[in-house]
Image (cartoon, rainbow, N blue to C red):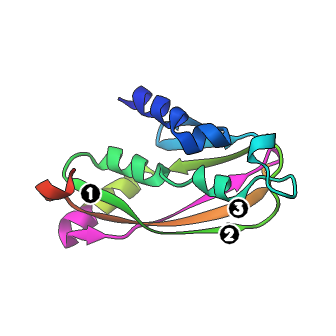
């Protein structure tokens, strides 16, 4: 299933069109994007929409997989702050520590719903932060109708 997910993400039209590549990490995902003629903006740097796209689904995917059945996970809010122009290859990591997953599970079981916050940094080849993405997720105990 994990291999299939990565294959499908690679073929997902917004990722395919922007040249975004995804790989699996032990506790999450990493996405990368090379600067190409087809994902540049007017100024010759990475298009902001593609920078956000390379971050969009990964905290949800990592968390829903790690929580397992019985939980519904959705994006609630997102914000991206552009700090410097993105050039060359950029990458972002989306990792959730096992202890954090346990805390989220316990909070959702106790309260019925929890809204954890996550942050990812998009970095260039020199390790300089190009942008920061803040995500708020909604996690709740799943009812039979919310699992679809």
Q: Is residue 58 left or right of residue 143?
A: right
Q: Which residue in the structure is indicated by mark 2? A: 81
Examine the rendered structure and indicate whether residue 25 appears above or below residue 86: above
Q: Viewer-proximal residue, 142 or 7? A: 7
Judging from the image, what secondary structure is the residue with disc 3 in?
strand
**Element marked by disc 2:** strand
Q: Is residue 112 above or below residue 63?
A: below
Residue 35 is marked as: none
- Furthest-right residue in view? 43
Q: Are marks 3 and 1 in contact (CB under 8 Å)?
A: no
Q: CA distance from mark 1 to mark 2?
A: 28 Å
Q: Nearer the viewer, residue 103 or 68?
A: 68
Q: Residue furthest left?
A: 144
Residue 88 appearing in the image:
yes
**Tag 2–tag 3 contact (CB < 8 Å):** yes
Query: Which span of residues is magenta-colored?
Result: 106-126
139 up-or-down from 147: above or below: below
Among the two numbered marks 1 and 2 on one chain, the one whose residue lies closer to the N terminus: 1
Q: Residue at x 48, y 49 (%)?
A: 58
Residue 52 drawn at (x, y percent): 62, 57
Q: Earlier in the sequence, mark 2 or mark 3?
A: 2
- Residue 146 in the magenta stretch? The answer is no
Quarter holding residue 47? bottom right
Residue located beneath label 3 in the image: 131
Pick the residue in front: 53 or 114.
53
Would residue 43 be found to the left or right of residue 22 on screen? Answer: right
Give residue 131's position: percent from left, percent from top: 70, 62
Residue bearing the label numbered 1: 72
Q: Residue at x 21, y 46 (%)?
A: 69
Cα separation, mark 2 vs mark 3, equals 5 Å
Q: Quadrant of residue 112?
A: bottom left
């Amino acid at each position: 299933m994990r291999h299939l997910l990565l294959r499908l993400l690679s073929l997902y039209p917004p990722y395919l069109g922007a040249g975004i590549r995804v790989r699996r990490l032990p506790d999450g995902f990493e996405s990368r994007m090379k600067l190409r003629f087809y994902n540049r903006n007017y100024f010759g740097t990475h298009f902001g929409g593609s920078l956000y796209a390379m971050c969009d689904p990964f905290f949800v995917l990592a968390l829903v997989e790690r929580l397992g059945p019985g939980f519904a996970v959705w994006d609630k809010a997102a914000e991206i702050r552009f700090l410097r122009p993105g050039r060359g290859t950029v990458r972002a990591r989306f990792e959730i520590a096992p202890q954090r997953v346990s805390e989220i599970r316990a909070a959702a079981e106790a309260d019925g719903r929890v809204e954890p916050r996550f942050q990812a940094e998009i970095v260039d080849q020199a390790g300089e932060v190009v942008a920061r993405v803040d995500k708020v997720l909604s996690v709740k105990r799943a009812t039979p109708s919310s699992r679809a």
